Image: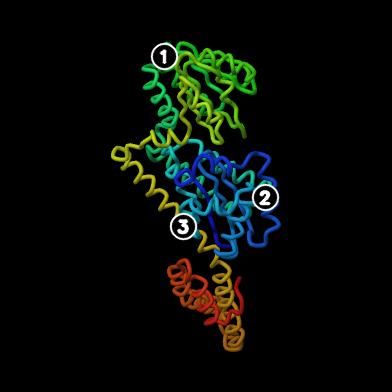
Amino acid sequence: MPLLALGVSYRAASVDLLERLTFGDDDFTKAYRRVADDPAIEEAVILSTCNRVEIYAAVPGYHPGFQAVKRLVCESRHVAPGDIDEPLYSQYELDAVEHAFTVASGLDSMVLGEPQILSQVRDALKRAQKEGAAGRTLTALFHSASRTGRRVRTETGVGAAPDAFVAAGADLAEAALSSIAGRNALVVGAGHMAALAAKHLRERGAANVRILNRSTDRAARLAERTGSDHGSLDELPSAIAHADVVVSATGAAGTVISASAIGERRRPLYVIDLAVPRDVEPEAATLEHVALVDVAGLREALSVRTGEASLEIERARSIVRDELRRFTLRRRAERLAPLIHALRRRGDVIVVSELERFRSDLDSLTPDEREAVETMARGIVAKLLHEPIVRLKELSEPGTQDAHAKLLAELFGIERVK
């Protein structure tokens, strides 16, 4: 079954559009129900992260698959088709496979080598399998993508600085406030990005770091690890009032920090919004003494020093190419396996038929002599079939393999091979 990848990412989409497209926990089940009802989509896996929304699908063909998957995105997220026409991209077959491997490796991330994407790829497959939407084709694709990502992590230096994104935000805050040292800091959230933020703020000498989260237990655990204070989101207005730096990185579906929660300020406040969808109401940036940077702003501020990283990037891309070749060969072998088995069965039938035809001539042979004749006959047939089979594998590039398989089947009188 052909593979299709269709999506929208940070490369061409605004933060507003990515927010509208992002799938929440309650959205996946409904979307996968649409997959089950659409005959143009055999399998699907939805990958929804801060920086991208992509759907990988096994489809009967490119054009019906493209229309069906695009319709799935628009109807699931209540977005007009015209809103995603410009940033929408799609890849088919090997291009889709290569894209999946590149994404899982962190090579297509806003922050090169970000650590979260590999686990997000794994989780996307698990969710699709749980919903009954991922079958053999996409399971094989995502397992290979995960393997590629693991190799890039372990065999290259890509991703050696996974907290670069948080560091970029901290750099901007430090520049705006002259220094973070001696300042009061507030971290909203208790996940991975929040932990990185607390770490950076501590390392830069923040006098006090307070962590607020919907789950106070999680806030307490993070606070203990980072030497911080903690509390619940109910304390948000008062905590902001005492803060000089606020970093928000929750997984909430809507606004967590409103402009009214910040209120009037008499001293500078720097707010870093690391979440998609955004945690902080954009109107907060209009408040006096308040500076706000979100993912879009950090995207501009963050630059990868490609000169220094080029060698590691090339090593990572070499791994992607190697895994792509392995995946292609394995997939090709699976597609050709029925025909190859049929050819070999045909050879066995011919050997048995010819031995039976000359049975009377062979009756005078000793058992050892008869076994030698039979072995020789099977060997001749095997050698005659070996070269066509090898050539079939070599010639079966995308777009030609079905034609070559059909021709070989016709030449050997095999009526139908699936």
Q: Amino acid at mark 3?
A: Asp
Does 102 sit left or right of 27 as displayed?
left
- Element marked by disc 1: loop
Q: Position of residue 84 (x, y in %)?
A: 54, 51
Q: Element under label 3?
A: helix
What's the colour scheme? rainbow
- Mark 3 Cα-neighbour bin, 10 Å: few <14, some 14–19, many ≥20: some
Q: First in sequence, mark 3 or 1: give its number.
A: 3
The residue identified by callout 3 is 95
Q: Position of residue 110 (x, y in %)?
A: 44, 39
Q: Quadrant of residue 165?
A: top left
Instruction: Report crowding for label 2: few under 14, some 14 to 19, many 20 or more residues within 10 A (C-alpha).
Output: many
Residue at the spot x=38%, y=48% of the render?
317
Three-letter amino acid code of the residue under disc 2: Tyr
User: How far apart are the alpha carbons under marks 3 and 1?
Assistant: 47 Å
Closer to the N terminus: mark 2 or mark 1? 2
Q: Residues within 10 Å of mark 1 (few under 14, many from 20)?
A: some
Q: Which mark, residue 193?
A: none
For label 2, the residue is 32
Amino acid type, mark 1: Gly
**Quadrant of image for the C terminus:** bottom right
Distance from the alpha carbon under mark 2 to that under mark 1: 47 Å
Q: Which residue ends up furthest to the left in the rendered image?
A: 307
Mark 2 or 3, nearer chain start: 2
Indicate whether 8 appears above or below 37.
above
Question: Viewer-proximal residue, 418 or 103?
Answer: 103
> Distance of mark 2 from mark 3, alpha carbons?
24 Å
- How many numbered discs sit on the rendered protein? 3
- The residue under label 1 is 205
